[in-house]
Image (tube, rainbow, N blue to C red):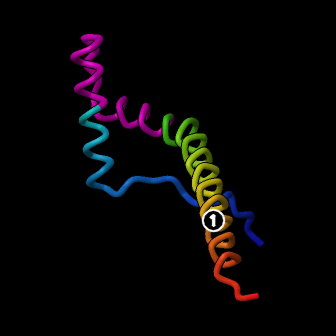
């Protein structure tokens, strides 16, 4: 039986191409570092593998907290509507 590591964090092909171009342009303009597509792809893969999961998990926690607060509010509203 395969072990699941959770959802795969991957961009759609169009988004990935845009991210690669953005990284290439940023490195060139900011640091005058001209990297080829292969090198920039490695950088994007590193960010996706090592950093993106932390942001993803933080977003999940934020949504859980928001939903918890919202459900508590709905529950409170329902109690207020209850007839005695």
Residue 16, how many percent across, how many down? Answer: 33, 47
Coordinates of residue 15 in the picture (x, y in percent): 30, 50
Q: Which residue is mark 1?
A: 73
* Residue 30 x %, y %: 27, 14
Q: Is residue 25 above or below residue 68?
A: above
Front position in the image: 2 or 15: 15
**Above or below — where is 80 with respect to 64?**
below
Predominant secondary structure, magenta span: helix
| Viewer-proximal residue among 78 and 42 | 78
- What residue is drawn where x is 26% and y is 54%? 14
Write down the quadrant of residue 1 in the picture. bottom right
* Spot occupied by residue 49 in the image (x, y as percentages of width and height): 55, 41
- In terms of secondary structure, where does tag 1 sit? helix
Residues shaded magenta = 23-46
Residue at horizontal 60 percent and vertical 44 percent from the top? 58
Q: Is residue 28 left or right of residue 5?
A: left
Crowd band around label 1 with a 10 angstrom C-alpha radius: few (<14), some (14–19), many (20+): few
Residue occupying image coordinates x 43% and y 31%: 43
Residue depicted at x 76% and y 88%: 84
Residue furthest toward the top? 31
State the residue in front, 42 or 14.
Answer: 14
Q: Residue furthest front?
A: 84
């Amino acid at each position: 039986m395969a072990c699941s590591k959770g959802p795969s964090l991957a961009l759609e092909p169009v988004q990935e191409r845009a991210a690669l171009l953005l990284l290439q342009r940023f490195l060139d303009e900011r640091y005058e570092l001209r990297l080829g597509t292969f090198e920039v792809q490695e950088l994007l893969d590193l960010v996706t593998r090592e950093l993106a999961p932390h942001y993803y998990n933080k977003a999940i926690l934020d949504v859980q907290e928001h939903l918890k607060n919202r459900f508590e509010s709905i529950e409170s509203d329902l109690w207020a509507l209850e007839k005695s």
